[in-house]
Image (tube, helix red, strand yellow):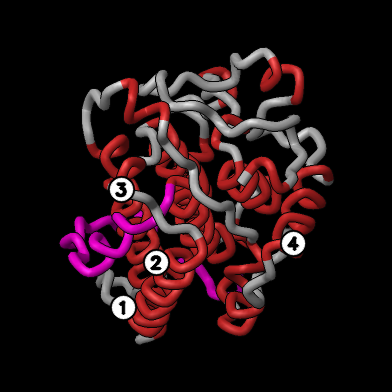
Amino acid sequence: MVPPDYVKQLKLSELPVHFKDLPLKRLPIDAVLARKSLKLSPRGVIALAAAMSEWVVWRIDAHHDFESERLVEAMWACSVHPSYLAPFQIDNWPKPSDPVWDSPPSKAFLSIQHHFRKLIEGMIGYQQLHDISNWCYNVLETGMFKNKKNRLESTIGKELATTFHSWLHETTDKISSLSPANEITYKCLIEQTPSQELQSKFSWGSPISRRDIHEEILSHSERTKTIDSFLKGIKDNPYLCNKDTIQKNKCWVFSKHGIPMPKGAPYTFNEEMF
């Protein structure tokens, strides 16, 4: 996994990091984006979350020691099958005393993981999309150049946030056209206790290839081959379950147990899995 072309053109990873702590201001919910997100299928929601998260991942890539490529790979794998996400292990998470928390870029890397995981845990909760976008705006806009009085020295942050805003709405529209939610699926997601009948008719929607977002929109057959090739190339990713764990159905516990998970062999993809 490498940064998409538009990230390379913005030279995000080359920008310095001068803030002493992560800037975080709660932004008002974007009502237009909220309405658009409700039209996305569950797979579409996860794909949008993965694409958004990449802005933060690549922005801070040069400023920490984590493996950005593996996290991006895991997020896109989850957009095909959310059960691929490995369960949270507290032993694998830095302890509060770990010096990694003193590094804003490292903290941002861990935080974007947290927000993405919360989206999966919330059974593809649409509220978590706002949390991820809020995090992106904060890191991109105010995580730039500051002087000793803690004032922004450059307009780059504001320009990046504006660019991200336009990209976010365009990408949401693109995903909505490729993987829309149907009415039954929408009801399952917003109802606290959907009926078994509703859950049995739940649809994950069509998967989105990373190439659909960062390059050109693929044909149906090209998308299937691209996703299958991508999944088969995943090896020993620490953020994902291994094949045996998935086959035993012990990789993840969702809050709505009646919703059927996508079918098919682990880390493969074919027409029957749409």
Q: Residue at x 22, y 58 (%)?
A: 25
Front residue (pair 216, 64): 216
The disc placed on residue 183 is 3
Q: Quadrant of residue 270?
A: top right
Crowding near the residue tagged with mark 3, few <14, some 14–19, many ≥20 C-alpha atoms within 10 Å:
few
Front residue (pair 271, 16): 271
Give the residue pinned by disc 4: 221
Q: CA distance from mark 2 to mark 4?
A: 41 Å
Report helix, strand or loop for mark 3. Answer: helix
Q: Residue at x 61, y 50 (%)?
A: 76
Q: Quadrant of residue 54?
A: bottom right
Mark 4 or mark 1: which comes first in sequence?
A: 1
Mark 3 or mark 1: which comes first in sequence?
A: 1
Q: CA distance from mark 2 to mark 3?
A: 40 Å
Crowding near the residue tagged with mark 4, few <14, some 14–19, many ≥20 C-alpha atoms within 10 Å:
few
Give the residue pinned by disc 2: 143
Q: Amino acid at mark 3?
A: Glu
- The magenta span reads 13-41
Whether residue 103 is visible here, answered yes or no, is no
Front position among marks 2 and 4: 4
Mark 3 or mark 4: which comes first in sequence?
A: 3
Front position among marks 2 and 3: 3
Q: Amino acid at mark 1?
A: Leu
Q: CA distance from mark 4 to mark 1?
A: 48 Å
The disc placed on residue 128 is none
Q: CA distance from mark 1 to mark 2?
A: 9 Å
Q: Amino acid at mark 2?
A: Gly
Mark 2 or mark 4: which comes first in sequence?
A: 2
